[in-house]
Image (cartoon, helix red, strand yellow):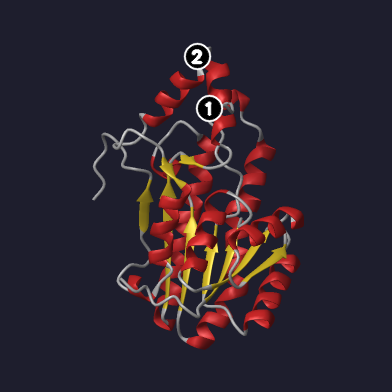
Amino acid sequence: MDLHLSGKRAIVTGGSRGIGFAVARALTAEGTDVALVARDAKALEQARARIGGNTLAVAADATDDDAVRAAVARTVAEFGGVDILVNAAAQPADPTKPTELAKLDDDDLRAEIETKVLGYLRFARAVAPYLIERGWGRIVNISGLNARRTGSPFGSIRNAGVSALTKNLADELGPHGINVTVVHPGLTVTERTPAMIDAVAAARGATSAEAADLLSRGSSLGRMITAAEVADVVTFLASPRSVAVTGDAIPAGGGTPGPIFY
């Protein structure tokens, strides 16, 4: 299937690693010009070199509105416009962090909201005028399955916030030809996975193999989905082919055993 992405121009935040990197690589493979955005300029240049194609490395902090607007302006100047925004800049979920009420730290939640919820809002706000002017666009927000379950209060709060933001943007921007969706990955295989498995093993007094098996049980497939597999879903949603989908959440974690979502 031709996704009709050749010649489109995208901004991918969190593009130096993990799901953001995988999305940037997948979009580039479809012929999209991609601006990779993250805080670490060195890591961005390394990521850009690995991906190749017509990519641009733009260092910016999603918690700084002026930096966000400058990153969008630079992308538009370099590419002649922007058609797609993929928001993926966030701290990865840490299954070893305390989740009990008495151990929750206010500043941890503030950091989560500043980066993942307000950061997504800032980029969407800066990009939207260009999409409206063209009468077409796609915004895909990477959230997470903690939006649908308990066990990580701050993970649930930040991800539910992203879902709420997504639906509001979809309803406002839809008449302008702009689709906005949210993707919920589960535990996803990235470059951080080996360290995460080791941390879970240490916390539980288990072997790394036992910890990996435990984490894999969280999906109907019995394994963790890879960042590249999540990127395939995001790439479709970023394409003109996804016109029938907007405002909705798309789970991409290999299936959640038990609950029925309808």
Name the residue beneath numbered marker 1: 197
Residue in the image at 48% along x and 40% along y: 189
The answer to whether 99 is drawn above or below residue 86 in the figure is above
Q: Tag count in the figure?
A: 2
Instruction: Determine the residue located farthest toward the top in the rendered image.
Output: 205
On the image, the x and y values in percent for residue 210 come to 44, 19
Label 1: which secondary element: helix
Quarter of the picture containing the N terminus is bottom left
Name the residue beneath numbered marker 2: 206
On the image, the x and y values in percent for residue 32 come to 51, 73
The answer to whether 129 is drawn above or below residue 187 in the figure is below
| Between discs 2 and 1, the one toward the N terminus | 1
Residue type indicated by callout 1: Ile
Label 2: which secondary element: loop
Specify few, some or many for label 1: CA neighbours under 10 Å numbering under 14, 14-19, or 20 or more.
many
Q: Nearer the viewer, residue 52 or 205?
A: 52
Q: In this orientation, does residue 104 appear?
A: yes
Instruction: Give the numbered dot on residue 225.
Output: none
Q: Nearer the viewer, residue 11 or 126?
A: 11
On the image, the x and y values in percent for residue 60 come to 72, 61
Could you say which quadrant of the image residue 94 lies in? Answer: top right
Q: CA distance from mark 2 to mark 1?
A: 10 Å
Specify few, some or many for label 2: CA neighbours under 10 Å numbering under 14, 14-19, or 20 or more.
some
On the image, the x and y values in percent for residue 82 come to 57, 78
Q: Nearer the viewer, residue 65 or 29?
A: 29
